[in-house]
Image (cartoon, rainbow, N blue to C red):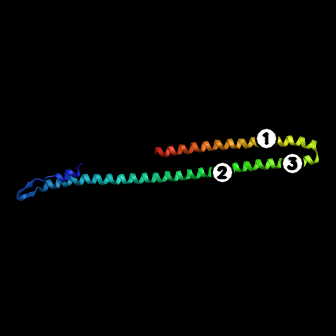
Amino acid sequence: MLTPTDIENKVFKKVKFNGYDIDDVEDYLEKIIVDYEKLFKENLEMKDKVDNLQESVSYYKSIELGIDQTVGNAQMEADTIKEEATNMADKIKKDAMKEVAEYRKKEEEKVLGQLDDIKKQIMAKEVELEEVKKQMQIYKVKTIAMLEAQIKILKED
């Protein structure tokens, strides 16, 4: 392939009357045309590749945006679940305390039996709350792992 320096330094054979050999000039121009056609085609191919890569980048950016939205939604859902579980536990505790106060007024012996049942319910709900918290932590870890895997895939591409 001819370089710009080759073109600049090309010396044509002179013929009679200080002119150039037409065949020599035409041969040289043919070489230039062939080389520049190759360059033009390569340039078009490169532009196509760049366009394809830009489309890929856009695609992966849209995936990243979707992942970000998923993470945001998951965090909001986790916060909601946590808040609901806390409210539920608070309500259960308040309800249990109210029941204890009402039954104590009516019947001391009956209240003592029911108090044991209520404490068991509270403990069961607290166990449930702890389980929900554990599940939430597992969900967060899995989500983070998934996102890290997605990020790794994006970085590899």
Amino acid at dot 3: Glu
Tell me what residue is drawn at x 22 percent, y 53 percent: 32
144 over 37 or under it: above or below: above
Is 33 situated left or right of 14 in this image?
right
Cβ–Cβ under 8 Å for marks 3 and 2:
no
Question: Which mark, by number, is residue 72?
Answer: none
- Label annotation for residue 123: 1
Give amino acid for label 2: Glu
Residue 66 appears at what percent x and percent y? 56, 52
SS state under label 2:
helix
Could you tell me the amino acid type at mark 1?
A: Met
Q: Secondary structure at mark 3?
A: helix
First reached walking from the N terminus: tag 1 or tag 2 = 2
In this figure, which residue is indicated by the disc labeled 2?
77
Query: Marks 1 and 2: which is nearer the front?
Result: 1
Residue 99, numbered circle = 3
Q: Residue 77 at x, y = what percent?
A: 66, 51
What residue lies at 60% left-to-right and 42% top-to-bottom?
A: 142
Q: Residue at x 89, y 49 (%)?
A: 102
Residue 144: horizontal and vertical position, in percent?
Answer: 58, 44
- Check disc 1 and report its element: helix, strand or loop: helix
Of 46 and 126, nearer the camera is 126
Left or right: residue 15 compared with residue 101: left
